[in-house]
């Protein structure tokens, strides 16, 4: 149970999008929330910036000399970004474009390569900036395993839960501002604050090894009918604003 006093700080948020808990909830929540905002932008600056990030990470991947699925999964990610640009190039409304995005994320078969790419991106970034991350990974810092082995065991495999190190690495690699909230008063963490100019901001609600998407309340909003502080049961998959998943068995934990 969460008391109303503990959750008062969540009054700043108007809606919650529930995300299935299958070990991919952080990656799913992060990229869906980000692209949902990119779709609302008139320009395609963010899409082209992301494609440049993929090129940069390809070079870093080559420098590491890994035998991985980077080529295939990065292409899947590029195709998703290209889809977003095509959706924006049509005469459809924002809500229709967001429905296209939601449909794309509705099955694990369509998205597993996207999550695999994001996991590889995290591992590449961590291993390319080892001096920043090793002190925060006890197993590596204490010499129990190498950073590369840790990434291949704890980051790259599908459906392995993300911890704080992975959150920082993904947000930093993509340069996407990220904040996490919790029902606990004063918990809010700015994981990555961005390069200092306007960019979509991702805000996630952490509920103990699980992440859902929350939406900041618009300054002019007066209605409280969709307050995030209504504390929906994270296991309630019937929410009309549910993120993604009416999944097939392959997407279940």
Image (spheres, rainbow, N blue to C red):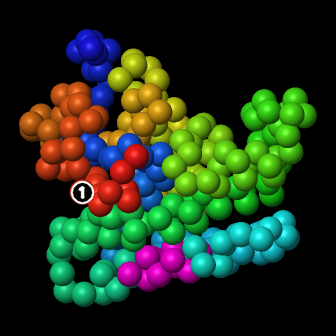
Q: Locate residue 76, reporting x and y percent.
A: 51, 77
**Residue nearer the viewer, 231 or 196:** 231
Q: Give the range drawn in magenta.
A: 74-83
Q: In which quarter of the image is residue 116?
A: bottom right
**Residue nearer the viewer, 140 or 60:** 140
Q: Residue at x 37, y 56 (%)?
A: 251
Q: In which quarter of the image is residue 216?
A: top left
Q: Is the magenta stretch mostly helix, strand or loop?
A: helix
Q: Which residue is drawn at 30% across and 28% down?
A: 10
Whether residue 250 is situated above or below residue 188 in the rendered picture: below
Whether residue 241 is situated above or below residue 165 in the rendered picture: below
Q: Locate residue 170, reporting x and y percent.
A: 60, 53
Question: In the drawing, does residue 123 fall left or right of residue 160?
Answer: right
User: Which residue bears the numbered disc 1?
Assistant: 246
Q: Does the magenta stretch include residue 179?
A: no
**Residue nearer the viewer, 222 or 101:** 101
**Can residue 33 be seen from the camera position used here?**
no
Q: Locate residue 253, reporting x and y percent.
A: 40, 46
**Can residue 233 be seen from the camera position used here?**
yes
Q: Locate residue 156, reporting x and y percent.
A: 64, 55
Q: What element carries label 1?
A: loop
Question: In the drawing, does residue 171 fall left or right of residue 85?
Answer: right
Question: In the drawing, does residue 27 fall left or right of residue 145?
Answer: left
Q: Residue at x 65, y 78 (%)?
A: 71
Q: Quadrant of residue 108?
A: bottom left
Q: Which residue is drawn at 16% across and 45% down?
A: 239
Q: Residue furthest right?
A: 143
């Amino acid at each position: 149970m969460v008391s109303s006093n503990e959750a008062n700080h969540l009054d700043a948020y108007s809606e919650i999008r529930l995300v299935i808990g299958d070990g991919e909830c952080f990656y799913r929540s992060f990229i869906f929330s980000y692209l949902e905002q990119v779709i609302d932008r008139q320009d395609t600056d963010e899409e082209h910036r992301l494609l440049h990030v993929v090129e940069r990470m390809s070079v870093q991947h080559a420098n590491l000399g890994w035998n991985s699925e980077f080529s295939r999964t990065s292409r899947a990610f590029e195709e998703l970004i290209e889809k977003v640009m095509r959706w924006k190039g049509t005469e459809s409304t924002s809500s229709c474009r967001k429905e296209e995005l939601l449909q794309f994320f509705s099955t694990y078969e369509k998205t597993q390569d996207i999550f695999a790419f994001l996991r590889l991106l995290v591992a590449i970034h961590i291993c390319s900036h080892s001096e920043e991350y090793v002190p925060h990974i006890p197993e590596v810092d204490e010499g129990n395993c190498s950073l590369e082995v840790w990434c291949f065991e704890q980051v790259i495999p599908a459906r392995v839960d993300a911890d704080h190190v992975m959150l920082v690495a993904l947000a930093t690699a993509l340069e996407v501002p990220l904040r996490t909230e919790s029902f606990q008063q004063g918990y809010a963490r700015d994981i990555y604050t961005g390069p200092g100019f306007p960019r979509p901001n991702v805000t996630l609600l952490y509920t103990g090894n699980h992440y859902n998407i929350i939406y900041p309340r618009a300054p002019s909003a007066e209605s409280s009918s969709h307050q995030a502080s209504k504390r929906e049961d994270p296991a309630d998959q019937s929410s009309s604003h549910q993120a993604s998943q009416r999944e097939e068995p392959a997407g279940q934990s």
